[in-house]
Image (cartoon, rainbow, N blue to C red):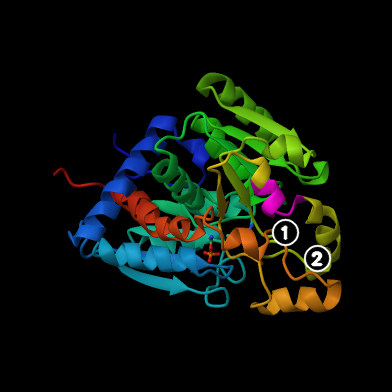
């Protein structure tokens, strides 16, 4: 398997075998990290990290992973780059491509990261767009595989806003890896119809399935994984909160949802999550709408079933695998 020189823009671009290869590499890198084995495979190289939206996990994961691979990083924050404002994507790609061996981009439309990749002579990695969050997918798949020992046949129920980056990406990940994906939400928030069709075609080959349902009992019945994400994503206008809370409250992950899933089901969330009043936005929503928890209750978030922090740690190991694979893995 050789992914050297490839971009990592969305999971759809990779075969199931290539995804498995990246997961295996991530598991190996994780083991090496735990044992203190150094993996400075790319000493002397540098990567650019463009963030047009904020981040805790993805930025830290890229920085730590790059450092562990022996590389330097330059972080361009949401206000710190000229990209798209004073300088075109194509020009930015060629400038950064002349100084760095790889470029991470987090921002808005998928078209931006695609265009960066088209013009940059080095690998481009998608750190989240409105449509997709592919590095998150590898972390999620690794976490599920660590927990259940397999991916094939696992049922993942996704609740809440399934029409954005997380819903789309999880549907693709499940279809590719032979898993059963159920979007369990109001029809208004179902994933993109064309993407759903494409995933159903893939599912027919891999033994996966794709279900879209508004029925919480049906959607979460016997699920191995219950997954949710924030109801309003980065970059969306503030005035959608009221509508989202009204539409998506019936799809909150709570104890009764978990009880309807399999006995040993796990709870997953890409994070950050609104499960208490310890955040500024959480408090604002409490003051405006009288709700103390949103997409997941604090009870579920803090329960034994919750693997969210293992999932967060795996962001680093899997992002390291993506960079290593696309920059080249040395023969052992
Ligand atoms: N899950 C995730 O992408 O987290 P950040 O927004 O903190 O990077
Ligand atoms: N859907 C969320 C994911 C954050 C990791 C967002 O785009 O803000």
Q: What is the x, y in percent for residue 103?
A: 42, 59
Disc 1 is placed on an element classified as loop
Residue 235 is situated, as x and y percent measured from the top left of the image, at 69, 65
Q: Quadrant of the N terminus?
A: top left
> Do residues under tags 1 and 2 come within 8 Å of each other at their CB atoms?
yes
Name the element at disc 2: helix
Q: Of callouts 1 and 2, which one flags the residue occurring earlier in the amino acid sequence?
A: 1
- Taking the magenta stretch, the answer to whether it contains residue 252 is yes
The answer, for residue 122, to whether it is visible in the render is no
Residue where numbered disc 2 is placed = 241
Asked if 107 appears above or below 255 in the picture, the reply is: below
- Which quadrant is home to the C terminus? top left
Left or right position of 312 against 199: left
> Which residue is tagged 1?
231
**From mark 1 to mark 2, how far is it between C-alphas?**
8 Å
Magenta segment boundaries in residue numbering: 251-258
- Determine whether, in the image, residue 228 is placed left or right of residue 126: right
């Amino acid at each position: 398997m050789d992914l050297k020189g490839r971009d990592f823009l969305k999971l759809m671009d990779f075969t199931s075998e290539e995804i498995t290869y990246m997961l295996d590499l991530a598991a190996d890198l994780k083991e090496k990290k735990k044992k203190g084995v150094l993996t400075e495979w790319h000493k002397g190289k540098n990567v650019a990290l463009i963030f047009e939206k904020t981040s805790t996990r993805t930025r830290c994961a890229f920085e730590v992973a790059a450092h562990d691979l022996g590389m330097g990083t330059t972080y361009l924050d949401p206000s710190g780059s000229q990209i798209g404002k004073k300088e075109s994507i194509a020009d930015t790609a060629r400038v950064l491509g002349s100084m760095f061996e790889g470029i991470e981009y987090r921002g808005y439309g998928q078209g931006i990261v695609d265009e960066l990749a088209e013009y940059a002579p080095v690998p481009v990695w998608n750190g989240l767009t409105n449509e997709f969050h592919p590095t998150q997918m590898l972390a999620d798949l690794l976490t599920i595989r660590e927990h259940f020992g397999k991916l094939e046949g696992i049922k993942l129920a996704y609740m809440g806003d399934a029409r954005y980056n997380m819903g789309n990406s999880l549907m693709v990940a499940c279809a590719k890896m032979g898993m059963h994906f159920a979007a369990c939400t109001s029809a208004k928030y179902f994933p993109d119809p064309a993407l759903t069709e494409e995933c159903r075609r893939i599912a027919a080959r891999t033994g996966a399935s794709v279900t879209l349902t508004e029925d919480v009992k049906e959607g979460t019945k016997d699920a191995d994984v219950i997954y949710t994400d924030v109801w309003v994503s980065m970059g969306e206008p503030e005035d959608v909160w009221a509508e989202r809370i009204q539409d998506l409250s019936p799809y909150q992950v709570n104890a009764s949802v978990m009880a309807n899933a399999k006995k040993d089901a796990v709870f997953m969330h890409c994070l950050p999550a609104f499960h208490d009043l310890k955040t500024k936005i959480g408090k604002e929503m409490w003051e405006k709408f009288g709700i103390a928890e949103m997409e997941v209750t604090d009870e579920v978030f803090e329960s034994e079933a919750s693997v969210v922090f293992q999932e967060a740690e795996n962001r680093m190991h899997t992002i390291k695998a993506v960079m290593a694979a696309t920059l080249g893995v040395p023969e052992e």
